[in-house]
Image (cartoon, rainbow, N blue to C red):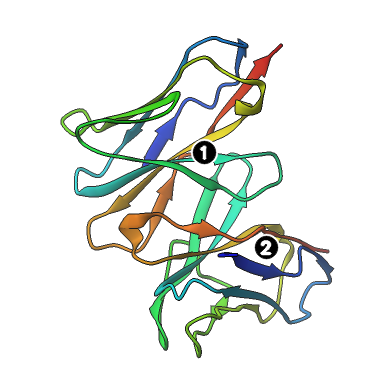
Amino acid sequence: EAQVTQNPRYLITVTGKKLTVTCSQNMNHEYMSWYRQDPGLGLRQIYYSMNVEVTDKGDVPEGYKVSRKEKRNFPLILESPSPNQTSLYFCASSLMGAYGYTFGSGTRLTVV
Amino acid sequence: RKEVEQDPGPFNVPEGATVAFNCTYSNSASQSFFWYRQDCRKEPKLLMSVYSSGNEDGRFTAQLNRASQYISLLIRDSKLSDSATYLCVVNEAGANNLFFGTGTRLTVIP
């Protein structure tokens, strides 16, 4: 089944404790992105990647890192999480941006 | 000013009704347009792309007006299962960022 898999689905952590949210897609897509969704703000792009070793900042990159060492994986790293990073996170992939994106099931992160 | 603006609703309509959602976007260079559907606490799912000539998929019709920078979605014969939040999404030419509206919430009532 074609899909984008994120883990974990839910995560509660403390301020400053490094964490990684994994994302993997099995569709051989070139494009991958991370979004966060907050009430009243909609989905906002954090980082995106057009291919292996090619990443760039989206609209809200502060406090996040990503890597794209393999085509299928695009992990999101929070080196020192803060409470304002409490949010619902989605990973997405696309063959090309104009074709629309397939989203993962989301990761609900709470930073206390 | 937001890139994509939608009426947040909520829209509460009876089964069988026709309902229309509207969306405006600010960047005239926008190239690709979509409607996504998002159920509560779930991921957005692509409902349909929107083409300049307008397009239809069963009970759903999407229209694009580039001159007015306006996108619409029409749902005919609403079903209970259509209850969801509908997201208007725009992709700028040559860009890799999707700009999302905050969504319009629809509830179809028996």
Determine the residue positioned at 76% across, 63% down: A9
Residue B65 x %, y %: 22, 29
- Along the line of sight, which residue is nearer the eye, B99 or B47? B47
- Along the line of sight, which residue is nearer the eye, B64 or A80? B64
Position of the C terminus of chain A, as image quadrant, is bottom right
Residue linked to disc 1: B102
Q: Secondary structure at mark 1?
A: loop
Q: Secondary structure at mark 2?
A: helix
Q: Are marks 1 and 2 in contact (CB under 8 Å)?
A: no
Identify which amino acid the numbered label 2 is placed on.
Answer: Gln
Residue linked to disc 2: A85
Q: Is residue A68 above or below residue A37?
A: below
Q: Is residue A104 above or below residue A16?
A: above
Determine the residue positioned at 50% across, 90% down: A69
Residue B14 x %, y %: 63, 9
Q: Is residue A90 above or below residue B63?
A: below
What chain letter is assigned to the residue under label 1?
B
